[in-house]
Image (cartoon, helix red, strand yellow):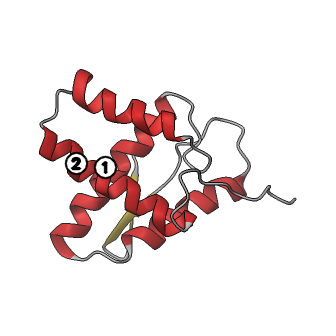
């Protein structure tokens, strides 16, 4: 699996290298900004756990070539099924991980079930 975290001044953050190949840099930058904006609200162990949960979701998206910036509800539900049926996580783990995913989208999408990102300009 691709390394997902980068270190800068002792602070870790999600490095969204997880968009399909050929995606413009501005899309990667928007994902990085969205992840950093969401994770900034956490400190200490909560930050570590939220970052880990977000990394797992972004890796799942990358493996399936799902753009996390423009995701449909059905794709998020497939992620839940994957956690339940493939990974066999307990309900409490699924709930915690989904709270991170939903928080990530609420932060960037103002409560929308679909995240839309404006097209990139050269």
* The C terminus lies in quadrant: bottom right
Q: Is residue 27 left or right of residue 99?
A: right
Q: Quadrant of residue 5?
A: bottom left
Q: Is residue 87 left or right of residue 60?
A: left
Residue 112 visible in the picture: yes
Residue 2 visible in the picture: no
The residue located at (13%, 46%) in the rendering is: 92
- Compared to residue 60, the image places residue 6 above or below, namely below
Q: CA distance from mark 2 to mark 1?
A: 5 Å
Q: SS class of the residue under badge 2? A: helix
Q: SS class of the residue under badge 1? A: helix
Mark 2 Cα shell of 10 Å, populated few (<14), some (14-19), many (≥20)? few
Q: Is residue 87 left or right of residue 75?
A: left
The residue located at (57%, 43%) in the rendering is: 71
* The N terminus lies in quadrant: top left
Query: Label for residue 76?
Result: none
Label total for image = 2
Query: Label for residue 95?
Result: 2
- Compared to residue 3, the image places residue 112 above or below, namely below
Query: Label for residue 98?
Result: 1
The residue located at (53%, 52%) in the rendering is: 113
* Picture coordinates of residue 40, whole percent (x, y): 38, 76
Cβ–Cβ under 8 Å for marks 2 and 1: yes
- Compared to residue 76, the image places residue 13 above or below, namely below
* Picture coordinates of residue 59, whole percent (x, y): 42, 39
- Please tell me which residue lies in front, 28 or 115: 115
The residue most toward the right is 122
* Picture coordinates of residue 121, whole percent (x, y): 85, 60
* Picture coordinates of residue 61, whole percent (x, y): 48, 37
The residue most toward the top is 86
Mark 1 Cα shell of 10 Å, populated few (<14), some (14-19), many (≥20)? many
């Amino acid at each position: 699996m691709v390394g997902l975290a980068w270190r800068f001044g002792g602070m870790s953050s999600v490095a969204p290298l997880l968009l399909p190949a050929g995606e413009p840099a501005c899309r990667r930058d928007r994902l990085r900004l969205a992840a950093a904006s969401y994770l900034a609200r956490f400190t200490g162990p909560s930050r570590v756990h939220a970052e880990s949960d977000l990394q797992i979701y972004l890796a799942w998206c990358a493996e399936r070539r799902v753009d996390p910036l423009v995701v449909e509800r059905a794709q998020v539900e497939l992620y839940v099924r994957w956690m339940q049926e493939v990974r066999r996580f307990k309900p409490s783990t699924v709930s915690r991980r989904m709270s991170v995913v939903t928080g990530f989208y609420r932060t960037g999408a103002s409560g929308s079930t679909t995240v839309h990102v404006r097209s990139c300009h050269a």
